[in-house]
Image: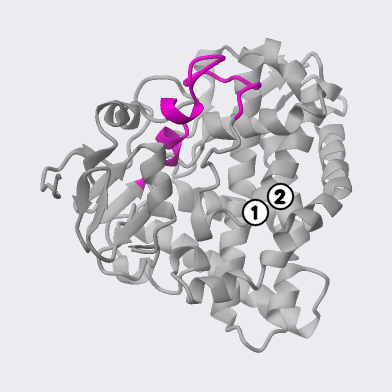
């Protein structure tokens, strides 16, 4: 049995210094090839366990001996400095039960599969209108700014009750929050700016509630304004950035492999194709943080109480033992692969609340894009594409296309 080590290991978060732009940073894949548990160093200098294997990642995310509470003094933070401010007023994503469950169940009903399926006509309408605007009188566009970002932004604004005319504000703040090179002060100021905006919006919803999530939360008497703002913050940022990056990355990758695009036109094959894109791209490259509440043995290694772990979804989703076998190699996209067990949305009680919405948006956006623009092609050489290598959520800065 191996115990914890004080060796510094690799630095987190690693970036795409080399290698395929559609896979995890090379430092993580190299660690995964060596061991399923590796020592790593956080930006603040603390040592953590980097967990890269599928079985081990899933075990951590479903084991309540590993805490999600960001207020724990040993919880690993991807931002160096400012721990006191960072840990103020966390969303339910960074809390343990019973606090996590109390807040999460307030919005669970809005993201049930049945509710999201009923929204498909609205998502289709938004997608078609966005494409109409993008293609009107033009033969070239930036797919990120003109298609990938507006669709999930419009949808999450519709759900939450956030005025879409404020989208430039929350997209600007979101980009600051997700940029690794932003200083701790800049990141925290951006977070506070977003929370203040949502507090003001919540106050307005209390006076004039409508049929949206923030209104339903605002009229409850068992939630504080801060809890509502923190929940809205999580849903607003997560609800548009992740899906926007998946749409643009998926499009760029498929344009390099046009022989696979036909799978999106088959209604029976479309859901499985999207699951494989989610597995292959897994845009949360920096991992999911936890801290051990007691000694836990994992894969022959003892993780001591108080030690931090980073569960790497991206490498877990390329575990040969789970997703290998017939078809293309594990590091290649294969839209016929059975990828249903992927961990792109996490696992356990904290898995992504909005996954039914993300699936619906991806299925509709990608199928509609390639159906309506069969001649879609990159407008610049691949080496000129700009990827967001300094973001906590991987994606593309721009994707020039023509048709």
Residue 26 versus residue 379: which sits nearer the camera?
26
Q: At numbered mark 1, what does the secondary structure look like: helix, strand or loop?
A: loop
Residue 3 in sight here? yes
What residue appears at the point 74 percent right and 76 percent down from the top-left corner?
216
Q: Name the colouring of the figure.
A: one colour
What residue appears at the point 63 percent right and 71 percent down from the top-left corner?
105
Q: Quadrant of the C terminus?
A: top right
CB contact under 8 Å: marks 1 and 2: yes
Q: Quadrant of residue 231?
A: bottom right
Residue 32 versus residue 385: which sits nearer the camera?
32
Q: Is residue 329 magenta?
A: yes
Residue 163 in sight here? no
Position of residue 156 measured from the top left corner of the image (x, y, whole percent)? 71, 55
Q: Is residue 400 left or right of residue 72?
A: right
Structural distance between the alpha carbons of marks 1 and 2? 5 Å
Q: Which residue is mark 2?
A: 357
Mark 1 Cα-neighbour bin, 10 Å: few <14, some 14–19, many ≥20: some
Q: Quadrant of residue 36?
A: top left
Residue 347 versus residue 8: which sits nearer the camera?
347
Position of residue 99 measured from the top left corner of the image (x, y, whole percent)? 49, 76
Question: What secondary structure prevails in the magenta region?
Answer: loop
Position of residue 2 measured from the top left corner of the image (x, y, whole percent)? 14, 44
Q: Quadrant of the N terminus?
A: top left
User: Which residues make up the magenta segment?
Assistant: 311-338
* Residue 354 disc label: 1
Question: Is 403 rendered above or below residue 170?
Answer: above
Mark 2 Cα-neighbour bin, 10 Å: few <14, some 14–19, many ≥20: many
Q: Is residue 143 left or right of residue 231?
A: right
């Amino acid at each position: 049995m191996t115990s914890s080590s004080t060796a510094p290991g690799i630095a987190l978060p690693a970036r795409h210094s080399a290698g395929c732009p559609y896979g995890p940073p090379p430092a993580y894949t190299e660690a995964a090839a060596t061991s399923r548990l590796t020592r790593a160093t956080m930006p603040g200098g603390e040592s953590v366990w980097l967990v890269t294997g599928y079985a081990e990642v899933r075990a951590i995310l479903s084991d309540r001996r590993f805490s999600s509470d960001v207020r724990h003094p040993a919880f690993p933070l991807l931002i160096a400095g400012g721990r006191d401010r960072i840990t103020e007023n966390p969303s339910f994503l960074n809390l343990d039960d019973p606090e996590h469950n109390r807040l999460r169940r307030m919005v669970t009903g809005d993201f049930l599969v049945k509710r999201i399926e009923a929204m498909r006509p609205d998502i289709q309408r938004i997608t078609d209108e966005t494409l109409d605007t993008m293609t009107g009188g033009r033969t070239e566009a930036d797919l990120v700014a003109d298609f990938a970002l507006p669709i999930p932004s419009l949808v999450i604004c519709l759900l939450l009750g956030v005025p879409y005319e404020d989208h430039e504000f929350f997209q600007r703040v979101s980009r600051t929050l997700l940029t690794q090179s932003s200083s701790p002060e800049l990141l925290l100021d951006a977070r506070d700016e977003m929370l203040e905006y949502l507090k003001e919006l919540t106050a307005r919803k209390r006076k004039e509630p409508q049929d949206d999530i923030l209104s339903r939360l605002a009229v409850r008497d068992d939630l504080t304004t801060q809890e509502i703002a923190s929940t809205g913050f999580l849903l607003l940022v997560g609800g548009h950035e992740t899906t926007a990056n998946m749409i643009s990355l998926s499009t760029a990758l498929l344009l390099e492999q046009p022989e696979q695009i036909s799978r999106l036109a088959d209604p029976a094959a479309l859901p499985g194709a999207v699951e494989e894109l989610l597995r292959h791209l897994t845009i949360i490259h920096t991992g999911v943080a936890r801290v051990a509440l007691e000694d836990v043995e994992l894969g022959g290694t003892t993780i001591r109480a108080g030690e931090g772990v980073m569960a790497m979804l991206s490498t877990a989703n390329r575990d040969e033992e789970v997703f290998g076998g017939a078809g293309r190699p594990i590091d290649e996209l294969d839209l016929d692969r059975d990828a249903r067990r992927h961990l792109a949305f996490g696992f356990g009680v904290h898995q992504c609340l909005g996954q039914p919405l993300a699936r619906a948006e991806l299925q509709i956006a990608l199928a509609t894009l390639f159906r309506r623009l069969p001649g879609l092609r990159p407008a610049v050489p691949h080496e000129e594409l700009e990827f967001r290598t300094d973001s906590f959520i991987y994606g593309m800065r721009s994707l020039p296309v023509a048709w």
